[in-house]
Image: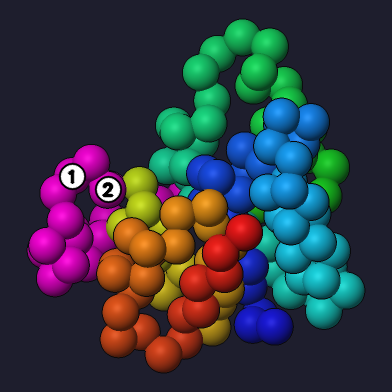
């Protein structure tokens, strides 16, 4: 496994709402377990929180995942934000895919990484040509 596992919104949501997410949650937990066994860093780009946190009691489930499993939220740097814009342009995607682009750009900043996702097609488009990134479909 790469040095870093990056979780997108689908992966984080699957971990937070395991009862509702079934097989997706099972695969997300398995990937997280392997990351911990391999002593990989586990990171969530901060824009992902905008997709999974809506206020209210549901946010407690996300907070529990973030606080209890060695998962660190990474702030979005200006460099990563600019890179995300370039990734969107190169992939021919619009701003509706901005959070996906932030995930890929953050993973690129962190070095060799695996991105765990429930949305592999768009992330593969954004990560095309990046040999240090692997997209893992949950």
- Whether pointer 2 and pointer 1 mark residues with C-beta atoms closer than 8 Å, the reply is yes
The colouring scheme, among rainbow, by chain, secondary structure or one colour, is rainbow
Residue at (66% x, 18% y) in the render: 58
Q: Is residue 6 above or below residue 40?
A: above
SS at mark 1 in the image: helix
In this rendered view, identify the residue nearer to me: 77 or 137: 137
In this rendered view, identify the residue nearer to me: 98 or 120: 120
- How crowded pointer 1 is (Cα within 10 Å; few <14, some 14-19, many 20+) is rated as few
The rendered magenta stretch, by its main secondary structure, is classed as helix
- Left or right: residue 5 versus residue 82 is right
Q: Give the range drawn in magenta.
A: 73-98
- In the rendered image, residue 75 lying in the magenta stretch gets the answer yes
Residue 110 lies, in percent from the top left, at 51, 73
SS at mark 2 in the image: helix
Residue 86 lies, in percent from the top left, at 16, 66
* Numbered circles on residues, count: 2
Residue at (63% x, 44% y) in the render: 12
> Which residue is tagged 2?
98
Q: In this view, does 13 lie above or below 44?
A: above
Residue at (68% x, 11% y) in the render: 57
> Which residue is tagged 1?
95
Residue 43 lies, in percent from the top left, at 61, 58
Separation (CA) of disc 2 from disc 1: 5 Å
Q: In this view, does 104 lie above or below 59?
A: below
């Amino acid at each position: 496994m790469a040095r870093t596992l990056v979780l997108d919104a689908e992966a984080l949501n699957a971990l937070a709402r395991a009862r509702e997410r079934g097989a997706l949650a099972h695969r997300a937990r398995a990937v997280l377990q392997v990351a911990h066994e391999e002593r990989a860093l586990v990171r969530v780009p901060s824009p992902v929180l905008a997709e999974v946190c809506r206020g209210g009691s549901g946010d407690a489930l996300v907070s529990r995942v973030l606080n209890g499993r060695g998962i660190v939220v990474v702030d979005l740097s200006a460099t990563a934000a600019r890179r995300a814009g370039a990734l969107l342009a190169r992939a021919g995607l619009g701003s509706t895919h901005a959070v996906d682009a932030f995930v890929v750009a953050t993973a690129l900043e962190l070095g060799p990484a695996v991105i765990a996702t429930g949305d592999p097609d768009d992330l593969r488009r954004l990560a095309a040509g990046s040999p240090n990134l692997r997209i893992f479909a949950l």
